[in-house]
Image (cartoon, helix red, strand yellow):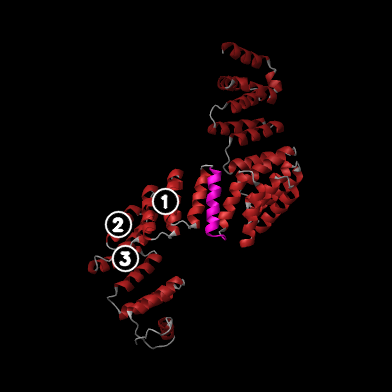
Amino acid sequence: MPFSSHEDHNLPLLKFESMLKTNDVYFFDSEDFQEIIHHYLDSGKVALAKKAIKIGLEQHPSSSDLKLLQVEVLVFENRFHEAEVLLNQIEAFETFNEEVYIQKANIFSKQDRHGEAIDLLKKAIALTDENADIYSLLGMEYLFLDNYEKAREAFLQCLEADMEDYAALYNVIYCFDYLEDFDGAIDFLNMYLDKNPYCEVAWHQLGKQFMSKKMYREALSSFDFAIYSDDTFIGAYLEKGRVLEKMNRYNEAIENYEITLSLDDPTSFAYLRIGKCHERLGNLDLAKKFYYQTVHEDPLLDKGWLAITDFYFKQRNYQKALYYVNKAINIDSENVRYWKRCARINEQLHFYEEADLAYQKTVELGNYELQTWLSWIDILLKLGEYESMVHTLLQALEFYPEHPELEYRLAGTYYLLSDGLKGRYHLKNALRHNYEDHITFELLFPGVYQMKTVKNIIADFKKAS
């Protein structure tokens, strides 16, 4: 039954759903079926979409558009072989249908055959003048292959078709960023803004590029233009606040962060930055207030808990610092930054066994910084755990071969374990790499340093040098 143009556009869908509830069979034209199927797919009702496709193909068995929607469902269900077979059937009759190549490319992409997907998308581009969406897909395929130059070219083609395709704009800048071509990004954005001078997104991105180059005045101007273009653009206020912090203009930074709180729901990031600004201004009570608001807003934000922990650490209130870092660890026990802070705080409180466990956890979670190893080893020295020291030092030397600070500590430990042969070997190795550091050796191992054999080794090395 045909519908007049003034009828409710939902009528085909309502009629189809009415048909499903009865034994009646209604006729729909191909376009109505496409509308119904798209509705179900967009709503995540795949089973109903499949039913509509089945009935649609029974009524319109030669409709390539319905078959392509069937392909879409097959791909969604990872039934790639069946989808390819159907696409080949469509291609045999419609060799110039770009959608066939797009769907084939989608299948290849899902199978990590990105090079083949790219070849198919290029064929699709050659078959149509409306190819902005295809260039977007092409750009994503190049990103999968880490070919950022080609990806950038593809996304630029999207922008040529539509200057306000902000997804493409972000992707172009992403490619520039990955290539660390900040100057290229700045030149591109300036050219873009010549054509689209009130694009707040472009001004915002330009400001971020200037931030990367530490050109803070230029960044500030860019964010001001972004705000002028859209005075509700929260991202621009946040970035402007960050720039003002870099310029030590903390009160102005606070004003910008506070604007974001009035424009939308408060964010933990804004609370945190306001707290940091107040702390730098010496407004400690206000800083503490905003740090607490940060973790109240987002209890899982590690930077918030670290800010409170560090706040009390700087005040030398180590007991409170320990309380909050342990609270953070209870929330996320795999956060290496929490354990690193925990180790330092326990060390200040002379809780050496707890510090030992915290440093061990820090390393287990992948923090292999030299200072972490040295701090852990020095804790073990205070505990008199010499065997554990040797084990830990040998681990550290795998990351920092023949590092003098580690070699001196290993030499001293072997002497404490009465292994003079190994002690002498590592002491000579340490002296060879950095003679001046033997002062640290004296401070850490005063008893060993006073040994006659050790003094002779150091004296002989000084004469030889």
Q: Is 228 contained in the magenta span?
A: yes
Q: Which mark is residue 122?
A: 2
Q: Nearer the viewer, mark 1 or mark 2?
A: 1
Q: Quadrant of residue 382?
A: top right
C-alpha separation, residue under disc 1 versus residue under disc 2: 27 Å
| 404 w.r.t. 41: above or below | above
Residue 190 visible to the viewer:
yes
Q: Earlier in the sequence, mark 2 or mark 3?
A: 3
Q: Nearer the viewer, mark 3 or mark 1?
A: 1
| 239 w.r.t. 84: above or below | above
Q: Nearer the viewer, residue 6 or 149?
A: 6
Is residue 83 left or right of 234 when viewed as pictured?
Answer: left
Residue at the spot 56% in from the left edge and 27% down from the top edge: 403
How far from the left and from the top, in percent, is residue 150?
36, 50
The region drawn magenta spans 215-232
- Check contact, mark 3 vs mark 1: CB within 8 A: no
Q: Secondary structure at mark 3?
A: helix
Q: Nearer the viewer, residue 83 or 166?
A: 166
Q: Earlier in the sequence, mark 1 or mark 2?
A: 2
C-alpha separation, residue under disc 3 versus residue under disc 1: 33 Å
Write down the residue under mark 3: 99
Helix, strand or loop for the magenta stretch, by majority: helix
Q: Residues within 10 Å of mark 2 (few under 14, many from 20)?
A: some
Dot 1 amino acid type = Met
Q: Nearer the viewer, residue 214 or 229?
A: 229
Write down the residue under mark 1: 191
Q: Nearer the viewer, residue 421 or 79?
A: 79
Q: Residues within 10 Å of mark 3 (few under 14, many from 20)?
A: some
Specify the quadrant that holds the N terminus.
bottom left
